[in-house]
Amino acid sequence: MIFSPVEIEETVNMFMRQKLDIRCITMGISLLDCADSDAKKANKKIYDKIMRYAGNLVRVGQDIEKEYGVPIINKRISVTPIALVAGASGEKSYVEYCRTLDKCARELGVNFIGGFSALVQKGITPADRILIDSIPEALAETSFVCSSVNVGTTKNGINMDAVKLMGETIKKTAEVSRNCEVNGCAKLVVFTNAPEDNPFMAGAFHGPGEGDAVINVGVSGPGVILAAAREYKGRPINELADGIKKMAFKITRMGQMVGTEAAARLGVNFGILDLSLAPTPEVGDSVARILEEIGLEGAGAPGTTAALAMLTDMVKKGGVMASTNVGGLSGAFIPVSEDEGMINAVKQHSITLEKLEAMTCVCSVGLDMIAIPGDTPATTISGIMADEMAIGMVNNKTTAVRLIPAPGKKAGEWVEFGGLLGGCPVIDVNSFSCADFINRGGRIPAPIHSFRN
């Protein structure tokens, strides 16, 4: 294939000036064959299998970076939800399983390992309950492990017993890890309709429907899309939309190349390519700034949800035209602490928790990396979670919550998480109680449109 000088210059600008990168290559590994009635044997099997499959993951990623000049920011691993593996052991705590995952990540040099997870959308098994009870201690004692719990699906409804339990777990996790370098809640996500092939943390796990090992790739390019938006300044929205779609196509082709090459070198299958606009705290790498370029004075202004809907849809349309492997989440993330534009929007009061919730109706994931006052009741956390899960259930999309109660902090005070996780002001939370609703428990039935057999 011959490239014109203009195309070469465009690609160089994407990498050098617009912060285009492969945000992550994530190796998914099935641990279903590692279950054992002896916990020590199970952990040994888990360690051996992860080390066997992912032993060259970091080196391969670095080699591809050097050979192709494509930045690959994170190398990660996701595994089968540990509740499905550890249940056979009869253990009363799964913290040791978490330590094993952390040991693998440390020795392999990966950034994160996801899969300390449970799937409880319709009911909670004894193993699920043990895993959830282990989360606060497990995340406080480890550095690289991420945890997720799926509490609802469009097909099954929302498990409100699990929602109540996770509100309490988030509250406890924040307290137990308050003196840790990274608050454990920054590594904990609660889902509805969790995808089995998500390469992004903290929600990644290797679904039971996946193969033995795969490579999933996450591409991120808010800076590139921002540059495309600037080229269409003042022009009709349909023309802007077409420009964003074309740029998303180009970004996806790069991710397809990297994913295919990494999978071949590691001797596993190429799973999916997730084209998500995943921002960072760096200036020029913000989804909020794209919304401003579209014509909003600040993220959260009237028109924000409409602009975000268009942006997310065009990113997906460009991606599916460029690859048959598009999956995961794909769209636009709106994490507060990981997006310098969102941080600014919270500071200037153009965005609120309620507006963020409205935006999640049309974008990827949900309420992400949001610091809330440390004295927020567990039932209020569960209520916020239930609202977000309902959006996912009714709209047949993935939604999630990653809330971080900040012990001792009030609305408006600053919380720092460090690195890619960034920092943000504590956001105000509605003070009216939902305790009676949450304490009912039970299950919100699946919506009528879920019956499609």
Image: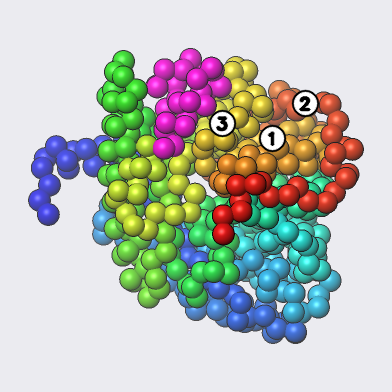
Q: Where does the image place residue 28, in percent across and percent down from the top left?
A: 51, 66
Closer-to-camera residue (263/344): 263
How far separated are the C-alphas under marks 1 and 2? 14 Å
Left or right: 77 in relation to 323? right
The residue at the point 66 percent across, 46 percent down is 447
Residue 48, percent across and down? Answer: 57, 80
Q: Whole-Å distance between the Cαs marked 2 and 3?
A: 18 Å
Residue that mark 3 sits on: 359
Disc with the residue nearer the chain's start (2 vs 3): 3
How is colour applied across the structure in the image?
A: rainbow
Q: Is residue 263 left or right of residue 186?
A: left
Residue 4: image quadrant is top left
78 shown above or below 347? below
Q: Report the amino acid beneath label 3.
A: Met
Mark 1 and mark 2 residues within 8 Å of each other at the beta carbon: no
- Residue type marked 2: Asn
Residue 91 shows in the view = yes
Q: Secondary structure at mark 2?
A: loop
Residue 120: image quadrant is bottom right
**Residue 332's x, y, as percent?**
47, 39
Q: Find residue 222 and report its horizontal and vertical position in percent.
A: 40, 36
Q: Is residue 404 above or below residue 45?
A: above
Q: Is residue 173 visible?
A: no
Circle nearer the N terminus (1, 2): 1
Single out the mark in the foreground, 3 or 1: 3
User: Is 300 part of what is drawn in magenta?
Assistant: yes
Instruction: Work out whether mark 3 precedes mark 1 in sequence or the reverse, and give the earlier one.
Output: 3
- Per the image, the residue denoted by label 1 is 371
User: Magenta part of the protein: which range?
Assistant: 290-313
The residue sitting at 55% across, 73% down in the picture is 30
Query: Which residue lies under the disc numbered 2?
Result: 430
